Amino acid sequence: MPHTLVVQAHQAVCLITLHRPQALNALTTELLGELAAELQRCADDPQVRAVVLTGSRKAFAAGADLNEMAERDLVGMLDDPRQAHWQQITRFPKPLIAAVNGYALGGGCELAMHADILIAGDDAQFGQPEINLGIMPGAGGTQRLLRAVGKSLAMQMVLSGEAIGARRALDAGLVSEITPPELTVERALQVAQRIAAKAPLAVRLAKEALLKAQDVDLASGLRFERHAFTLLAGTADRNEGIRAFQDKRPAEFLGR
Ligand code: DAK
């Protein structure tokens, strides 16, 4: 049983809630380890087709736990178990949706950016305040933020430590929707349920292809897309999808 998370099944969607209310969900090694393990469990469980990750109304997560960080020196950083946990979280293969209310700062913002889709309450604050502490983002913040919001805003946020609100995050493309805070999780679950009803292999390969667009040149990305598309042509779910359309009934996808 995790100590720092609350995990609930909503049919084919797993809702994971960060739960360290005493520290605005600051990310300890324990929390990151439990999250990585829970995501691995979701990845291995064929019943789970999508995950929603959220925090509290006040904070998605206020960054790395600064009390824990204060105890780690450079030598401790070199074999820091948090590195491995972050790597594992990065590799999650199923759709991951972040429902963000309140503060998403430092590692909290970086964690939200690990999600494939971000839905934010209109009170959300996204920021990389590491510069205020004499450090810089270390869990993908410089790379993912720049890709999400472009150079100028990413530079401004990382170099000045200034946070942006939900509306600005929406305009910049960091989040795909904003909602009243009391509806953020509900809306994220709704989107996740919709995705969970699709063919799992198609969802998985589409996610992989979309992520490739950020990493590789156009020709390589198009090659990957062609291979993935051809692969899906041989699946039972593709036949079911087309047959269901012709029969005018909802498709029942089995992940084969
Ligand atoms: N760590 C530990 N405790 C925290 C915390 C944090 N990051 N943020 C808040 N808390 C605690 C506060 O100490 C306070 O505890 P008590 O005093 O009540 O015991 C409680 O949560 C409530 O916080 P506040 O009283 O401060 O609440 P306010 O509403 O006044 O302010 C705030 C909210 C979010 C603006 C403020 O708490 C704040 O500025 N928090 C710190 C934000 C921050 O600087 N975060 C850390 C950035 S550094 C790595 C990868 C990534 C990272 C590290 C390593 N590797 C790959 C190894 C990431 C680094 C970072 O995230």
Image (cartoon, grey):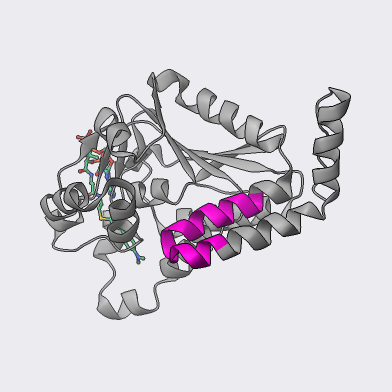
Q: Nearer the viewer, residue 192 or 241?
A: 241
Left or right: residue 247 compared with residue 120: right
The residue at 34%/35% (across/down) is 59
Q: x, y (%) of residue 124?
A: 31, 31
* Residue 206 painted magenta: yes
Is the residue 122 above or below the residue 151 in the image?
above
Q: x, y (%) of residue 218?
A: 45, 62
Q: x, y (%) of residue 133?
A: 15, 58
Left or right: residue 186 compared with residue 203: left
**Chief secondary structure of the magenta span?**
helix
Over which residues does the magenta segment extend?
204-222
The residue at 72%/58% (across/down) is 230
Left or right: residue 140 compared with residue 221: left
* Residue 83 painted magenta: no
The residue at 36%/52% (across/down) is 110
The residue at 81%/29% (across/down) is 245
Q: Quadrant of residue 172?
A: top left
Q: x, y (%) of residue 209?
A: 56, 56
